[in-house]
Amino acid sequence: MNTSASHSEQLDQVIDVLLAIRDGLRAEPPTEDVLELLVPIVDEDLGIPMLLSDILRASARAIAADVEPYSSEVSSVVADLREAAGEIMRWHCLHWAVRDLDRATAATSEVVS
């Protein structure tokens, strides 16, 4: 599987999209617009924390299965990737915080209307 060039190009595009989102949020748009972006970003199944966690775990498995000899340095990197994956997965709680904010702002706008 030698698709590193196309993967590299795709990652560049993803990074460009994330940078554009970041820059747009720095302009302090209305909460409704922020939520429109945040809901899919922190989705509990396919959001960035879950995907990044899965990517780090898969990377750790691939490295552990491929590298010979399996040195203490390699073991340390694999352990760090797995630890980071666990930490990032705990960010899934952001999904619920964003959903709560969405409900709270919807309820507030209904009262104001």
Image: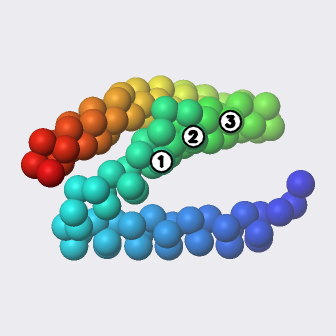
Of badges 1 and 3, the one in the foreground is: 1
Q: Disc number at residue 46?
A: 2
Left or right: 75, with 1 as reference point: left
Tag 1 near tag 2, CB within 8 Å: yes
Pinpoint residue 6: horizontal percent, then vertical percent: 77, 69
The residue singled out by tag 3 in the image is 58
| Crowd band around label 3 with a 10 angstrom C-alpha radius: few (<14), some (14–19), many (20+) | some
Disc on the earlier residue, 2 or 3? 2
- Could you tell me the amino acid type at mark 1? Pro
Q: Nearer the viewer, residue 9 or 31?
A: 31
Pick out the residue farthest to the front. Answer: 113
Q: Secondary structure at mark 2?
A: loop
- Could you tell me the amino acid type at mark 3? Ala
Query: Residue at (62%, 41%) from the top-left corner?
Result: 55
Tag 2 near tag 3, CB within 8 Å: no
- From mark 1 to mark 2, how far is it between C-alphas? 8 Å
- Could you tell me the amino acid type at mark 2? Leu
Disc on the earlier residue, 1 or 2? 1
Q: Nearer the viewer, residue 69 or 53?
A: 53
Residue 36 seen in the current view: yes
The residue singled out by tag 1 in the image is 40
| Crowd band around label 2 with a 10 angstrom C-alpha radius: few (<14), some (14–19), many (20+) | few
Q: Secondary structure at mark 1?
A: helix
Query: Residue at (38%, 55%) from the top-left corner?
Result: 36
Residue 83 seen in the current view: no
Q: Disc number at residue 75?
A: none
Left or right: 39, with 29 as reference point: right
